[in-house]
């Protein structure tokens, strides 16, 4: 959902301010999760968000890794997961909140949110 302020101009109706952007809800059994995480990987929508820092992310390669605070383990992040969460890329060192699932090759992010947005929801 996108919420905007619009204004009628000589070129037609135009958005002048973006008030809110919410990515569409994606269910645990959706094709996106099955394609990226793989069959049989179970996700828990009620799992708490964990604070993490982006180790690196390469948009052209389509993936990257984060480290959950308190753990040195790399957690895989796929660009399609970012897209389902309303993001396009991550920057090294950026603080995020993630939910993870264990896949055939280890921990994988299935939900990622920008740290500032998580803090704003908590207040």
Image (spheres, rainbow, N blue to C red):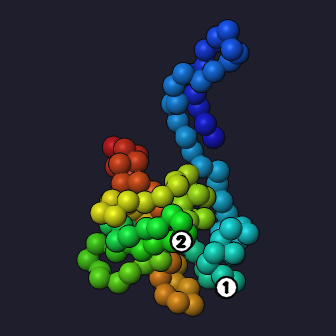
- From this view, report whether residue 31 is shown above or below residue 89: below
Q: Secondary structure at mark 2?
A: loop
- From this view, report whether residue 98 is shown above or below residue 3: below
Q: Is residue 51 left or right of residue 81?
A: left
Residue at the (33%, 59%) spot, across then down: 94
Q: Residues within 10 Å of mark 2 (few under 14, many from 20)?
A: few
The picture places residue 29, in percent across and down from the top left corner, at 71, 71
The picture places residue 15, in percent across and down from the top left corner, at 59, 24
Residue designated by label 2: 61
Residue, far front: 60
Residue, far right: 31
Q: Secondary structure at mark 1?
A: loop
Q: Earlier in the sequence, mark 2 or mark 1?
A: 1
The picture places residue 33, in percent across and down from the top left corner, at 65, 71
Q: Is residue 102 left or right of residue 96?
A: right
The picture places residue 47, in percent across and down from the top left corner, at 48, 69
């Amino acid at each position: 959902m996108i919420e905007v302020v619009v204004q009628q101009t000589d070129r037609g109706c135009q958005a002048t301010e973006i008030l809110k952007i919410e990515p569409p809800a994606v269910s645990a059994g959706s094709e996106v999760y099955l394609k990226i995480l793989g069959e049989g990987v179970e996700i828990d929508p009620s799992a708490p968000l964990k604070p993490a820092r982006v180790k690196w992310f390469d948009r052209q390669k389509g993936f990257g890794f984060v480290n959950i605070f308190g753990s040195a383990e790399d957690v895989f992040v796929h660009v399609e997961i970012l897209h389902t969460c309303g993001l396009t890329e991550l920057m090294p060192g950026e603080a995020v909140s993630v939910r993870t699932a264990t896949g055939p090759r280890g921990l994988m992010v299935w939900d990622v949110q920008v740290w500032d947005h998580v803090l704003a929801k908590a207040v």
